[in-house]
Amino acid sequence: MSLKQRTIRGLSWAFIDRFANQISQFIFGIILARLLSPAEYGLIGMLAIFFEIADTFVVAGFSEALIRKKDPTVADYSTIFLVNVFTGIFFYSLMYLSAPGISWFFNEPQLIPIIGVLGITVVINAFGMVARVPLTKNLDFKSLAAISVISNIISGAVAIPLAFKGYGVWSLVWRNIMQSLLTTILVFVISRPPLRFMFSYASFREIFGFGSKLLASRLFLEAYNNIYYILIGKFFSARDLGLYTRANGYKDMFSRTLHNVIQSVSFPALAEIKDNDERLRNAYRRLVQSTTYLTAILMFALAATSDNFILGLIGPKWAESIPYLQLLSMIGLFYPLHYINLNILVIKGHSGLHFRLEVLTKFIALPAVAVGLLYGIKAMIICMIFTWVLDYLITASRSGKLIDYPLGEQIRDILPSFLFAACMGVFLFVAGQVITLPALLTLLIQGILGLGFILFFSNLFKIKPFLEIREIVLGKFSKKTALAN
């Protein structure tokens, strides 16, 4: 099977994986949001930065290093596995000992027992990191899809009865633990990674030399992504943080999930052709165009339907999160583009430049923090939008120089998708104002109208990413029909 065929197959299963996951998480999330309060979600949000940083240290860029390496040995896998596990245990111990201080900082006594229990997920996840690498390296996203769907459904089915019985925030805690445990068990059963109880200093030095720069980059990324949780949790309230967390979660459900799907498949695929600059450039250009088309449609649609989305799905007690979701959707436009451009640096072996760009772009975000303290959460998000635009321009400029794909050319490639999606968003927003039905029914009608708009005008104007996606979908459908006959 050619690289193109394996990539398309990987993308298909990765999309199935994420789609099935998001559907299950979405349904369970709606039920839990109706049963729980914004303050209970806020308690979990206060801990986000600590868990993200711990998980970042556990991964430490080693997965990408193993994927990028052509023939990793048993010593490579075994060494990184041991490092991951001991790192996970260390950070769980550190979080456990720091729990009283974290609780004091946020003035929330409930955080102490929550950290003690929820922190176990750091260790559980550490066991499964290396086991995912063979599946990702071989583009076996069919297995990863099955693992994710099973763990999501079972963990959600555990959380809902707990929420009904009044367990509150603990229903979210046990959902996370169950999901991590099931995922780790299943990935080991299916992947069967080549592990031995051995440690190779030579393997560690080689992989850490590459991965350490990605680790530093990701630390800045996670600090940037989660500093707002600390700001809101400390200077506002658990309820305010819960409203922000829910809105940001819905934004991530579309934007970050799409990015994760595309990156998980494109990184190993592009890594195979990293030494062929012309082929890499052409593949990367198509990737940018398709990603922009899909992301822009999702984000403008989410912004246009935010009021009916929130009120219809999780109820009026979350109404104050509507403007947050509208503004955060604009950030979601640039998140995938920024990190797809950073990926080129990693693929070409410039992890040091990757780190320097992450430092630069995250320092740019400091004004948004100051604005949040002075003028509130909405003003902070508006400032964040401008910082993400600047982040994208910087990273696209630097990555473009490596593969002869300059910033101006990339902007010309993505601008039609932005304009198309903006027109669709205006259409959906106006439709939502005109229709006077209940919120959930109005949201359904907006969804149907939006799909019709996309299919009709994308085909009418022969939008290139749409035609390529349609060709892939129809090709796979025709193949399945032929096999069935």
Image (tube, helix red, strand yellow):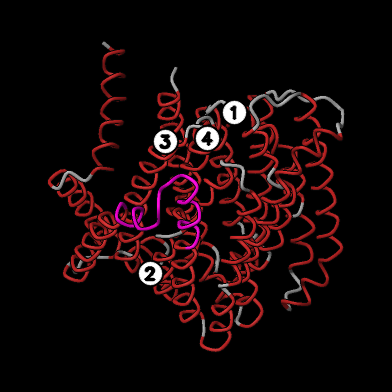
Q: Position of residue 422 (x, y in %)?
A: 26, 62
| Side of 257 where 291 appears, left or right | left
Marks 1 and 3 sit apart, C-alpha to C-alpha, by 28 Å
Closer to the camera, 302 or 162? 302
Which residue is painted at 22% across and 66% down in the image?
426
Residue 399 colored in magenta in the image:
yes
Q: Position of residue 107 (x, y in %)?
A: 73, 79
User: Can residue 226 be seen at all in this image of the molecule?
Assistant: yes
Q: Position of residue 245 (x, y in %)?
A: 54, 66
Neighbor class of circle 2 (other Cα within 10 Å; few <14, some 14-19, many 20+) is many
Region in magenta: 394-413
Quarter of the image with the C terminus is: top left
Q: Is 251 rendered above or below residue 131?
A: below
Q: Which residue is mark 2?
A: 326
Element class at badge 4: loop
Q: Earlier in the sequence, mark 3 or mark 2?
A: 3
Marks 2 and 4 sit apart, C-alpha to C-alpha, by 38 Å
Residue 105 colored in magenta in the image:
no
Q: Position of residue 471 (x, y in %)?
A: 26, 31
Marks 1 and 2 sit apart, C-alpha to C-alpha, by 37 Å
Q: Which residue is mark 1?
A: 135
Q: Which residue is mark 4?
A: 274
Which residue is painted at 40% across and 29% down in the image?
8
